Image (cartoon, coloured by chain):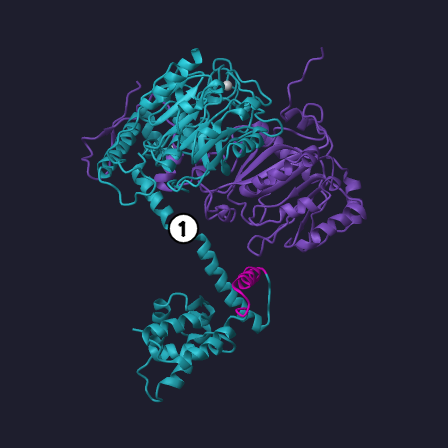
Amino acid sequence: MFTDDLYLDSKAGTPPKTKHVSFKPAKKFHSNDYSNNYVHRKSFPQKYVANIENTVEGYPKLKRLLEIKEKQILEYSSKPYGCKIGLDQMVPKLNQWIHKDKINFDIVMIGCLSDNQFIYPLLTQLPLDKLVSKPGFLFIWASVHKINELTRLMNTELWAKKFRRSEELVFIPVDKNSPFYPGLDNDDKALFEKMQWHCWMCITGTVRRSTDGHLIHCNVDTDLCIEKENNRDGAVPSDLYRVAENFSTATRRLHIIPTRTGFEKPVRLRPGWVIMSPDVMLDNFDASDYKKEISKIGTNIPIKAEIENLRPKSPIQKAQ
Amino acid sequence: MVNLELLDFLIESHAQLVAEPVMGNMEDLFVLYKGIYIASGDDSYSLERFVEDIDSIANTSKGSIVFEENRLLSIEKSSHITKYIKLIDVYLLNLLHEQLVPSSRVNRTKNSKTDAVECAPASSSNLMDRLMVALDSAIEIKSDIESRKEKVWNHYLFSKLDELLTTNVGSNILGKERAMHNTPVAEFIPICANTEHSSLLSTLLYIVNNKIVSMQTTKLSKCEAQCPGFKECLLNNIHYVSNLKPQTDLTLGDCSYLDTCHKLSTCRYVHYLQYIPQSLKERVSKESQEMNKIMETKNSKISYYTHGECCSSSFKTLLPPQWICCDVRKFDFRVLGKFSAVIADPAWNIHMNLPYGTCNDIELLELPLDQLQEEGVLFLWVTGRAIELGKESLTNWGYEVVNEIAWIKTNQLSRTIVTGRTGHWLNHSKEHLLVGIKGKPEWINRNIDLDLIVSITRETSRKPDELYGMVERMVGTHARKLEIFGRNHNVRPGWLTIGNQLTGNCIHEMDVQERYDSFLNSASA
Ligand SMILES: [Zn+2]
Ligand SMILES: [Zn+2]
């Protein structure tokens, strides 16, 4: 009953009748060497990842969790705020928010996918520990080279005490035509062509992954984002925001972009975020409005039973 | 041939030609030019000729005339010309003039120098300032005519700057080309992403004991009718079919472990089997073998680009695998000699207890890894908090961290790992490999490969083999290469592997053998 079919090869050069191709299954597992393929065919390895567009393909439970979370996050979002400001005015402005307006944020993201950002001066001039509440979460996005340079600062005792480095995130553009290709990071020293952006995720204060489910949801997202097709319309791919939103339940989120991004990479607004940048598309931030709005929404997204059921949790430790 | 009169005309009046009201319009330029240089009544010089002459100047001196397309022009003037001159670089035109009529017009050169200043408003300041202005102008909006001219100039300067920065150096182009000719082609079979194909295929396959045994080919033509191109796709691509069992619950989705699942007989999640026709596999294997054979015969001739290659590489045979089973922490590294490339995959102790012999982090930092290379590259696998510790160690050993390679870990279905609480706060879909360089090795081939590896996960902590190819392309196949903390699956030709889980020793280099013997003697003494 189960016989091999005779397949007539129509390829030019071989007489169709003499060449028989069978459908008989091969026994050995095959996996491709995409690095070798890159050398010969100049085709980027990341392109062959099968779940770029739908990262949770095959995991209906996880997919459902992300959908519900997305909906709930939007439900508890402040309206999108922009603070359009010159680079040299950022620190004074933030100081004003901290000291005069008494605002702080639980999630602070600094930087975007751009070379030539003024991150170091910002980090050293800002009273970050006053800007970020406790517990709070800090995400710093920059080129690999810049993150490496920052290691020295972040490893100093003073820093390491306040901000514990917790994860290192990576963003990968699909090819060299991507607006997110880190071309300028490819300096003379590099031994391999750079295709990555890195992010330092730091935690201030104390959170425990087993007991603080009202504050954080662990293991929902991963530490890797590969550029999606429809995500090229601005300076910041939405994945960068999404990771922070999915991890922390906090509603007070600030994104500081210490560089000019220009016309080609506009800084778009996002519900639930205050975005500070010289190029943000709207300048509508008002401290008292914002505080009012947050007091209505609450500082954290409330616990939802369905999410609790679905999200990955640490194994419960039995009481001794 | 370059029309000298036209060249004169362009140099003479360049500022007016691109400014209001002419704005580089070709027809208006033609009228102006004709009025000055062509006797009235002479109609033999046509607009077409004029455009050709302009083009020939633009092509002779690249960048001297910058055009812009504007489709509206052809509607407005009812002509077919859709481009206008955006910018005239009078400096380049003067250079061209000098080439054609050497130092004929001292007067002109002097004149046009002031013209150049006019055209490039910021050129009185230094180059750096001009570049900064150019960069800014990509962002600033300016509306008045004066600054528009400035903007056009700056835009041009910016595009030149960008071109310079993105230009690939010759050594890199040659290096990549050589790597392509010297690297054996690996068998490559694309993966089909069509879900309809998978479900059709699963109705055809006969699965016994989690293996595809055969195919019910009588139904093939029916499937082909239902989905044209199906047969062709089967014969050219890898397909995955679900391996459904009585206990499988489709609503649960895929098993996180897929083909590495240990509970296949009870696990209720969906698992998959890979389907490749034997014929496809044989064809691809034959094709790559043929390509590699051609490559080998070609390479018996010495390539012209020899940078970083040893002089006998075309006939030298590769050293067979070498390994020494030893406790790395107590080993005398002087026994090993010096290497071009070193890979280390220590079992970091941080946060986890792995089933194989772990090495205390402090002990690791104290390893004399600074003895292994005069100049060269060191690759260090790190995880979690060891990223910083690793960077610190590399610096202490005399290296500068110049790259971080990301290993994107994939599963049987070539998807990234997104489940399974693989990290403390977020799931981990990648691992980091630090790349440190010591000294100034001029023989290194830079930027042949990317700082990415996309590869399937295998046994716990086993790293992707792709790295070996990348290192060999960088330092050459005949360079001495060392792997520290290697296991039996890590030994390979051209490499020396050390670690405490290797089976016995195998040393081919006489000097290493001698030093190793005396090390053993002194240790036992
Ligand atoms: Zn297919
Ligand atoms: Zn399973």
Q: Which chain is cyan?
A: B
- Is residue B51 left or right of B357 when viewed as pictured? left
Q: Which chain is purple?
A: A
Quickly name the residue at label 1. Answer: B168
Indicate the secondary structure of the residue bearing disc 1: loop
Q: Nearer the viewer, residue B358 or B506?
A: B506
Report the predominant secondary structure element of the magenta stretch. helix
Q: Quadrant of the C terminus of chain B?
A: top left
**x and y percent of residue B468 in the render?**
39, 30
Q: Nearer the viewer, residue B295 or B186?
A: B295
**x and y percent of residue A130 in the render?**
75, 41
Residue A278 falls in image quadrant? bottom right
* Position above or below: B118 against B328: below
- In percent of the image, x 55 and y 55: which residue is there? A264
- In percent of the image, x 60 and y 49: which residue is there? A117
**x and y percent of residue A126 in the render?**
71, 45
What stretch of residues is rendered in magenta?
B122-139
Q: Nearer the viewer, residue A258 or B273?
A: A258
Residue A160 falls in image quadrant? top right
